[in-house]
Image (cartoon, rainbow, N blue to C red):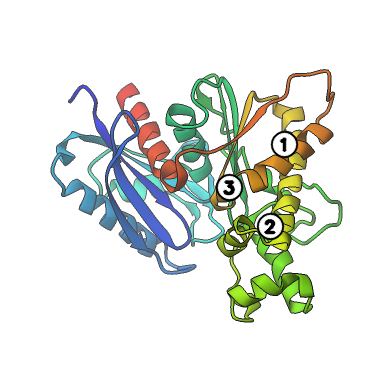
Amino acid sequence: MVDAPLAIGLDIGGTKVAGGVVDADGSVLRTARRDTPHRSTSPRVVEDTIVSVVDELLGAPGAEDVVAVGIGAAGFVAADRSTVVFAPHLSWRNEPLRDALGQRVDLPIFVDNDANAGIWAEHRFGAGRGESHLVMVNLGTGIGGGIVIDGHVIRGRFGIAGEFGHMQVVPDGIRCECGNRGCWEQYASGNALVREARSLMSAGSPVVSDLFDRVGGRPEDLTGPLVTEAAREGDALAVELLGEIGRWLGVGMANLAAALDPGTFVVGGGVSAAGELLLAPAREAFRRQLTGRGYRPEARIVAAELGNEAGLVGAADLARTAALAS
């Protein structure tokens, strides 16, 4: 075995499987990607896609130094790091993913939640380096999250810790896809940002004219990145909408601080691309809502550094660590 072995990491979502060969310093040496059929009803289809990506990466020069495969899956992963209990955008229901792939890939395989993989990458190589108590909040379509304390990912008794997006912040609030009402991700996520903008567009509000022009009068074509682009270019409504998302973000993080008392919050996910347009109002709301404000240290709130590669980098590093330990 080489002194600094390589590992393959895969980030699996509802529409894509992104993989990479990652070295011990967190550098991605090569990548591969496949689309997955949207909401496929067959676990085998996703499994085939994963194996295709792994085979491509293992076929490249230097692949003989790969010692493990790590998978970051968007869903609930059991504490055994083997079974995907539930994945809302895929067909996995109590899917024994590690065992299924182990019959087709001749390397140790480790499965984890994608947010756990992301926070591990930020802890090891990104914005959370050197922090003993780290919490990550990922703002994408919804909200995911992860916890690292003293160099360990905290997965919970059943492996499902970190589902922060489904904390209730508004009793009897907006209905969430999870079935409950008032979940945090209904107020601080990419979906929330787009929903509010589209609502104003559909109502014919004059304050939304810039966004209306950007999508040619079609509210259904509006996306979060378009709102962020408009805000960066000075559109007052887009700035206001991101500020509202940021304020809800700060409220939720104040709740997490009351429970977990981290030293640093790392904010990742697609919406975090808005930078200070999001984080400045989040910090302000966090200070205003923090329990014991004025009499306790405040956690730092910073942007993630590793971007879209965090999930595969973290999955690879977790797999490498586990493989070497065993």
Q: Tell me what residue is drawn at x 15 percent, y 39 percent.
A: 62
CB-based contact (under 8 Å), mark 2 and mark 1: no
**Snapshot quadrant of residue 227:** bottom right
Question: What residue did someone put label 1 on?
Answer: 283
Identify the residue position indicated by label 2 in the image.
178
Residue farthest along the front direction in this orientation: 234
Who comes first in sequence, dot 3 or dot 2? 2
Left or right side of 29 for 226: right
Q: Is residue 182 above or below residue 304?
A: below
* Dot 3 or dot 1, earlier in sequence: 3
Q: Given the image, on which type of amino acid does mark 2 rest?
A: Cys
Nearer the camera: disc 2 or disc 1: 1
- Tell me the residue at 70%/51% (across/down): 188
* Type of the residue with mark 1: Arg
Local packing at callout 3 (Cα closer than 10 Å; few below 14, some 14-19, many 20+) is: many
* Residue toward you, 24 or 244: 244
Residue 126 picture location, percent across and down: 46, 32
Q: Is residue 37 visible to the viewer in this orientation of the structure? A: yes
Instruction: Say what amino acid the circle numbered 3 marks.
Output: Ser
Q: Residues within 10 Å of mark 2 (few under 14, many from 20)?
A: few
> Which mark, by number, is residue 272?
3
Q: CA distance from mark 3 to mark 1?
A: 13 Å
* Point 79% across, 57% down: residue: 181
Q: Position of residue 68 (x, y in %)?
A: 29, 36
Q: Mark 3 or mark 2, which is nearer to you?
A: 3
